[in-house]
Image (cartoon, rainbow, N blue to C red):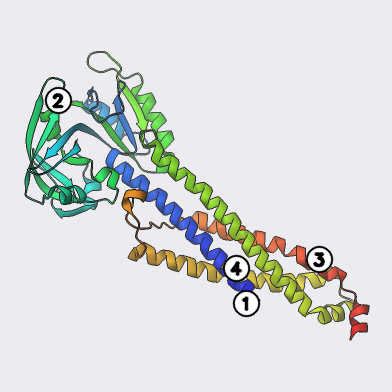
Amino acid sequence: MRVALAGMIVGVMVMILTVCIVVGFKQTVTQQVAGFGAHIQVVSFDNNNTYDLHPIEVSDSLLTQLASYPGVASASPFITKPGMLKTESDFEGIVLKGTDYWDFFARHLQAGALPVAPQEVLLSVPLARRLGLDVGDAVTAYFVDADDVRARRLRITGLYETGFGQFDELFLPTPLQTAARLQGWDADTYSGVEILVDDIRHLDEVADHIYFATVNHLDDNGYNVYYVQTLHQQNPAIFAWLDLLDMNVVVIIILMLLVACFNIISGLIILILESVQLIGILKALGADNRFVQRIFIAQASMLIGKGVLWGNVLGLGLAALQYYLHLLPLDAATYFVSYVPVAFSWGWLLLLNILTILVSVTVLWLPSLIIARISPAKVMHFE
C-alpha cells in the first residue's frame, strides 16, 4: 500500500510539474517574442519579410483608432533598419529599431539607462561582451542602401538582456527620432505600428478587428498599403515548436495516469486478498457484493485522496522553488530562455486534479469485482 501511495504521489507530482513548466515555456517565449515585435504589427502590404520594411503613413487619427479597439493595450509606431556595428577588431550585423515603447526593455535593463536622445542606443549584454563595449562607449554603425553607405556614431547608454539570444544579439533599440533621421522619412512615416493586446487568448479576435479597420483605410495619396500580421505569423517556426509541447504534455499525462491507475489497482487487489476472511464473514452476515465493494472502494479512495494531496504539495512546492529561485538553468541559445520557466495555470491544474481523481476512482471498480467471486462457504471451510 505504501508503494501504491508513493506511485500515486509521484504520478500527480510529475503531471503538475509538466503542466507548470510547459505553460511557463509558452508564456515566457511568447512574452519575449512580443517584446521585440509586439502581438500584432501593421506594416506595408509590400512587406518582404525582412527588417528593411517599406514605409507606410500612420496618422495620429489612425493610431488613436487602433489604440481604442477593445482588447488593445497600446499602439505605437516603429522603424527598423538593418546595419552593421564596427569596432577596431570586430563587426556584427544588427537591426536598429526606433521605438517609443520602452516597458519591455526597461524590465530587462542590466546596466546604464534607457536612451532618450538621438544617436543613443541600448546594446545587448552578449553583443557588448563580444564586441568589447560597455555603457558610455561610442560605436560606429553602417547602413547600406541601394546607392550609398551611411555611417552613424552611436552612444551606448545601457545594456539589456532578455535571455532570448536569437533577438538579443540582433536588435539595437533607439529612440524613434534616431531611426527616422537615418531613414530621412517625413513625419508620420514609419516602418509600421506595433500593437499589444490585453489578453493573448483573444489575439486572433483583436487581429481581425485591426484588419477590418485598416483594409479600407487609405493613406494621403489615396492608396491602401496596410497589412496586418500577428506574432504567430511573424515567427512560425518558434510557435510550431511551442505547439509540439502540447503533444508532449498529453503523452506525459496519459502515461502518469496509467501509472497511477496501475498502482491503485494493484494496491486494492492486495487489500482485498489480505481481507478475504473479513469479506467472507461480512457476506455470511448478509452483506451483498455491492456493499462490500463500497467498503473497499472507500478505503482505496482515501488512498487516492492522500496521494493527490501530497502530489500537489510536492509538485507545487518544487514548481514554486523553481519559480522564485531559478534552480534549473537552460541553454538560452537552444531553448530561448536561460532557466526552466514555470507558470501556475490554476484552471488547468484544477482540471488535472479532477481528471486524476475521476479516472482513479472509476478504475477501482475493476479489481473490486474480485469480491463477487469470494464464497463465504469456502472461506469458512478453509478456516
Closer to us: mark 2 or mark 4?
A: 4
Determine which residue is flagged by label 4: 8
Q: Quadrant of the N terminus?
A: bottom right
How packed mark 3 is, by other alpha carbons closer than 10 Å (few <14, some 14-19, many 20 or more), is: some
Residue 84 image point, x, y percent: 15, 36
Amino acid type at mark 3: Leu
In this figure, which residue is indicated by the disc labeled 2?
187
Residue with the mark numbered 3: 369
Asked if the residue at tag 3 contacts the one at tag 1, i.e. Cβ–Cβ closer than 8 Å, the answer is no
Measured as percent of width and height from the top left, residue 250 is found at: 56, 51
Q: Nearer the viewer, mark 3 or mark 2?
A: 3
Marks 2/1: CA–CA distance: 73 Å
Instruction: Assign a secondary structure to mark 3.
Output: helix
Relative to 50, say whether 251 is above or below. Answer: below
Give me the residue at 60% from left, 68% from top.
Answer: 8
State the image quarter where residue 330 is shown. bottom left
Q: What residue is shown at x 9% (from left), y 44% (from top)?
A: 89
Mark number displayed over residue 2: 1
Q: Name the residue: 34% across, 58% down.
A: 339
Crowd class of label 2 (few under 14; some 14 to 19; many from 20; radius 10 Å): few
**Residue type at the position of mark 1:** Arg
Please tell me whether residue 362 is drawn above or below residue 218 in the rendered image: below
